[in-house]
Image (cartoon, rainbow, N blue to C red):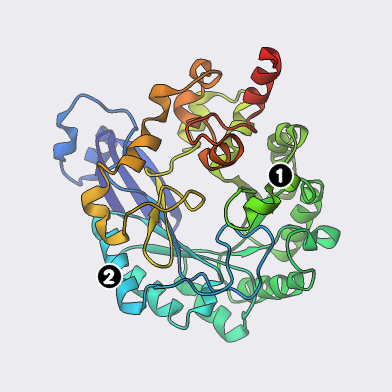
């Protein structure tokens, strides 16, 4: 079992069964891992971490699929993409910092001929590599090699009529075949589904499809106005009614099918609208925007952003050990709750939600520090305030 000390106690992780948990100081002591200088202070709250737990690392920007909503604007390989040696040095940096997971994607990660060598190196360094693919290029031989990854998720934004909402309809056949190959090879397999206005009505059909395919889970990702997603966001963003309906719908379908349904952190404001108990959210490590704290986004050239959907900063992966605690862009995101405007300031979920998706706020309002304009509470507040 891997562990990392934090002021509140520590973080522990296991590959089998797979889990990552935040635990307090007494629990860490029971594990017999020793003491930490981080425990000298009285503060035992879960706030700023000593390093991210997960890094979303683009293996390449190259991708032939060219989905309409691609947040990376995938197509051609980016200039100065990290070669294998440089990429492996970057993995070493993340391992030395105490990162647990690296989520490899793209573009289409399988466009890199060395992707399995990179995953194997991550394993050697104690990092769990996970992978997201479109299904393009998947073969039986490649599927057999995918066991090096903790999990492989295939991007599917709908079944039946919804399959072609964001991508060419023929791409569904590639994704469908890839899922069959991965499940057949015994690879832990999930589905990534980007939710927008037009495919939200197909969520129930996607659950039925996923259950029939035997995948582990479906992760629902909110459409973000980044990359090519910015050009379709106004027309494709989910409606107020869809945002309100999402959480109870996923809970109902998950219970009916026995499938695990996850949402990304940008959907947490929609979850909080239904007033779930705070202690339950905290116990299940449910949190809103944790850019530049729990997670980071790193492009294929090694440039760093607070998350995959925010602009990169004047910062390299190799600068992270020296800049993690002090980079101004990180500090801006981490201190958001200290300066939160209404209605967030009065919301009891403030410290957990952290204002929702700041990438959406920056795009829609022009202000990174504004509350998420699609949060139902923010919408209701604006309606009450009037023009």
The label nearer to you, 2 versus 1, is 1
Instruction: Note whether 304 is above or below 274 in the view shown.
Output: below
x, y (%) of residue 375?
63, 30
Q: Is residue 132 left or right of residue 299?
A: right
x, y (%) of residue 17?
45, 56
- Residue at image location 71% in from the left, 18% down from the top: 383
User: Does residue 265 appear anywhere in the picture?
Assistant: yes
- Residue at image location 75% in from the left, 53% down from the top: 207
x, y (%) of residue 340?
46, 23
Q: Is residue 238 left or right of residue 64?
A: right
The front one of 320 and 141 is: 320
Q: Earlier in the sequence, mark 2 or mark 1?
A: 2
Q: Which structural element holds mark 1? A: helix
- Residue at image location 49% in from the left, 36% down from the top: 368
Residue placed under numbered mark 2 in the picture = 89
Location of the C terminus by quadrant is: top right
The front one of 258 and 117 is: 117
Q: Residues within 10 Å of mark 1 (few under 14, many from 20)?
A: few
The front one of 374 and 246 is: 374
- Residue at image location 78% in from the left, 51% down from the top: 199
Cα distance in 3D space between marks 2 and 1: 40 Å
User: Does residue 274 appear anywhere in the picture?
Assistant: no
Residue placed under numbered mark 1 in the picture = 234
Location of the N terminus by quadrant is: bottom left
Q: Which structural element holds mark 2? A: helix
Total tally of numbered discs in the picture? 2
Instruction: Note whether 291 is above or below 107 in the view shown.
Output: above
């Amino acid at each position: 079992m891997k562990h990392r000390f934090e002021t509140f106690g520590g973080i522990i992780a296991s590959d089998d069964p797979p889990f990552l948990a935040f635990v307090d100081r007494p629990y860490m002591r029971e594990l017999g891992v020793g003491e930490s200088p981080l425990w000298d202070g009285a503060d035992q709250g879960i706030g700023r971490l000593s390093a991210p737990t997960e890094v979303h690392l683009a293996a390449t920007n190259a991708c032939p699929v060219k989905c309409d909503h691609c947040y990376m604007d995938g197509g051609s390989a980016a200039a100065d993409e990290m070669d294998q040696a440089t990429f492996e040095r970057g993995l070493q940096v993340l391992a030395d910092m105490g990162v647990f997971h690296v989520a490899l994607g793209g573009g289409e990660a399988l466009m890199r001929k060395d992707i399995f060598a990179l995953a194997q190196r991550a394993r050697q360094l104690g990092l769990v590599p996970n992978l997201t693919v479109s299904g393009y290029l998947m073969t039986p031989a490649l599927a057999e090699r995918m066991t090096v990854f903790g999990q492989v998720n295939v991007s599917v934004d709908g079944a039946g009529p919804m399959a072609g909402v964001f991508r060419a309809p023929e791409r569904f056949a590639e994704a469908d075949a890839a899922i069959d190959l991965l499940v057949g090879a015994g690879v832990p397999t999930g589905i990534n589904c980007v939710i927008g206005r037009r495919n939200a009505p197909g969520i129930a059909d996607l659950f039925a499809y996923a259950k029939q395919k035997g995948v582990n889970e479906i992760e629902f990702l909110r459409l973000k106005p980044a990359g090519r997603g910015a050009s379709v966001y106004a027309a494709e963003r989910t409606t107020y009614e869809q945002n309100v309906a999402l959480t109870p719908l996923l809970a109902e379908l998950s219970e009916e099918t026995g499938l695990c349904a996850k949402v990304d952190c940008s959907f947490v404001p929609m979850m909080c609208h239904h007033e779930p108990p705070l202690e339950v959210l905290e116990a299940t490590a449910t949190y809103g925007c944790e850019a530049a704290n729990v997670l980071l986004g790193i492009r294929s050239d090694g440039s760093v952003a607070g998350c995959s959907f925010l602009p990169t900063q004047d910062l390299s992966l190799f600068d992270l050990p020296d800049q993690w605690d002090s980079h101004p862009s990180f500090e801006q995101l981490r201190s958001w709750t200290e300066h939160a405007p209404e209605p967030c300031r009065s919301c009891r979920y403030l410290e957990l939600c952290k204002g929702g998706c700041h990438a959406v706020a920056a795009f829609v309002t022009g202000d990174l520090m504004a509350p998420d304009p699609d949060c139902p509470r923010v919408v209701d507040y604006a309606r009450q305030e009037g023009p």
